[in-house]
Image (cartoon, rainbow, N blue to C red):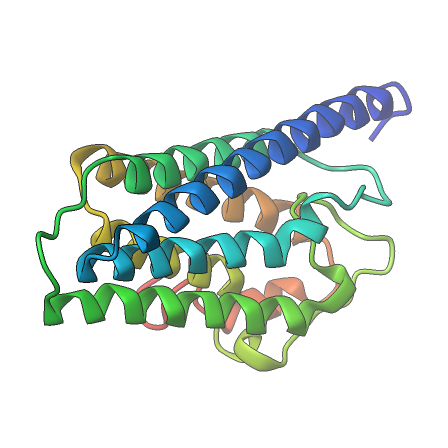
Amino acid sequence: MNQSSVPRLLSTAGLATLWTRVLLITMLGVTAVVGVAHLLAGEPVRVVAGLLTLAYLAWLAMEAPVTFRTPAQAVAESRTLTAYVSARTLLVLAAVLLPLPWSDWSIWMVAPIALFVGGVALRTIAIRALGRQYTHHVLRRDEHKLVTTGPYRWLRHPAYAGMLAANVGFVVFFLNPLSAVALVLLAAVLVWRLLTEERVLWSVPGYPDFAAARARLLPGVW
């Protein structure tokens, strides 16, 4: 990377970070208001919807410190972060602001809720395995260390796998045409992002061998 490109990348990364923070605050506010409104309605189906919405709020809040952390090193790429947070915000707003697809409690609600919980759990375990190396930016640290513990024993990108699974569960519960389109968009952006990240990480010693031995998102599939 030449010296003249560093200010441009840092400026682009700064704008991407600002955009991410603004949309995160938007998602936090909307999920808080909608979640409480569902609970206050008192109807069984809306109570369940409210609890799931507030669970999504808690997930967003849990990762908020990372969102507001300024990257210590030059960011390699920022377009995927902007696209990712935009697609995720569209998904959340489409899911919680449009009418519920359920008229009453159903046992079929259990499956998407379980998928959501499982996805968040997988992502949380993966983030903890990465420790301080986890970031929302695509970058290569000066002393980048490969993590092969936890879910990284089987997957290259378990945090992305968990993210996708959780959002699939969330959208299936709040299913409508717009949230379904947003989910497809989010999945496409996540694939773009992880492929971009792999190109950046390919020069890390041992990463090609690490990648060759593991699927990206789902063992035996991709």
| Front residue of 47 and 164 | 47
Please identify the quarter of the rendering in which residue 71 is found.
top right
Residue 54, position as x, y percentages in the image: 43, 56
Residue 122, position as x, y percentages in the image: 48, 71
Q: Quadrant of the C terminus?
A: bottom left
Please state if 56 lies on the left or on the right of 187 as rendered: right
| Front residue of 186 and 49 | 49
Q: Residue at x 61, y 59 (%)?
A: 62
Q: Residue at x 33, y 52 (%)?
A: 40
Q: Is residue 155 above or below residue 45?
A: below
Please state if 222 lies on the left or on the right of 32 as rendered: left
Please identify the quarter of the rendering in which residue 2 is found.
top right
Q: Quadrant of the N terminus?
A: top right
| Front residue of 13 and 70 | 70
Q: Is residue 121 above or below residue 186?
A: below
Residue 82, position as x, y percentages in the image: 56, 30
| Front residue of 68 and 54 | 54
Q: Residue at x 55, y 32 (%)?
A: 23
Q: Is residue 25 above or below residue 51?
A: above
Q: In the rendered picture of this protein, how many numbered marks are placed on residues?
A: 0
Residue 49, position as x, y percentages in the image: 28, 55
